[in-house]
Amino acid sequence: MNKAEEKRRMREWVECWKLAGPELERIRREEIRKTDTARAVAFLSGILESHVRRHPPGRTSGLVRQQAFFSRARA
């Protein structure tokens, strides 16, 4: 493919996205508007609780281990 053909195809691609962009934005806004936020939060909360049950947090924040790692890396 020569440079002129490549430029032409790139212009076509950009033009397609200029047309598609507003429609995609309209679809995104419509999906957001139709979303049942309470249901989504409940679903995500369930996932989080399940993960925490399987992988309980450590007794510390990990800051001490992080600082020790940084100290070794600096040396």
Image (cartoon, rainbow, N blue to C red):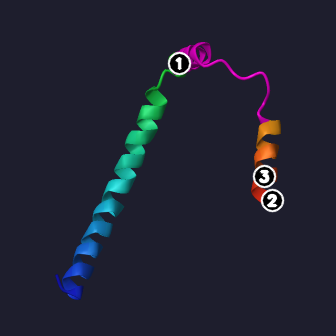
The residue lying at 40 percent from left, 44 percent from top is: 26
Residue 43 falls within the magenta-colored stretch: yes
Which residue occupies the foreground of this view, 1 or 65? 65
Q: Secondary structure at mark 1?
A: helix
- Mark 2 neighbour class, 10 Å CA radius: few under 14, some 14 to 19, many 20 or more: few
Q: Nearer the viewer, mark 2 or mark 1?
A: 2
Residue 26 circle label:
none
Name, please, the residue furthest toward the left.
1
Label 3 Cα neighbours within 10 Å, binned few <14 / some 14-19 / many ≥20:
few
Which quadrant of the figure contains the C terminus?
bottom right
Q: Which residue was labeled with disc 1? A: 47
Magenta span main SS: helix
Q: Is residue 66 left or right of residue 16?
A: right
In this view, 9 is above or below 69: below
Q: Position of residue 53 (x, y in %)?
A: 60, 12
Element type at mark 3: helix
Residue situated in front as seen by the camera: 15 or 67: 67
Instruction: Say which amino acid is labelled 1.
Output: Ile
Mark 3 touches mark 2? (CB < 8 Å) = yes
Whole-number angstrom distance, CA of label 2 to CA of label 1: 41 Å
Q: Is residue 52 above or below residue 74?
A: above
- Residue numbers of the magenta segment: 40-62
Q: Quadrant of the N terminus?
A: bottom left
Q: Amino acid at mark 3?
A: Arg
Was residue 19 drawn as part of the magenta stretch in this picture? Answer: no
Between marks 3 and 1 in the image, the one whose residue lies nearer the viewer: 3
- The kind of residue tagged 2 is Ala
Mark 2, residue position: 75
Cα distance between the residues tagged 3 and 1: 36 Å
Residue that numbered label 3 is attached to: 72
The residue shown at (28%, 74%) is 10
Side of 53 where 43 appears, left or right: left
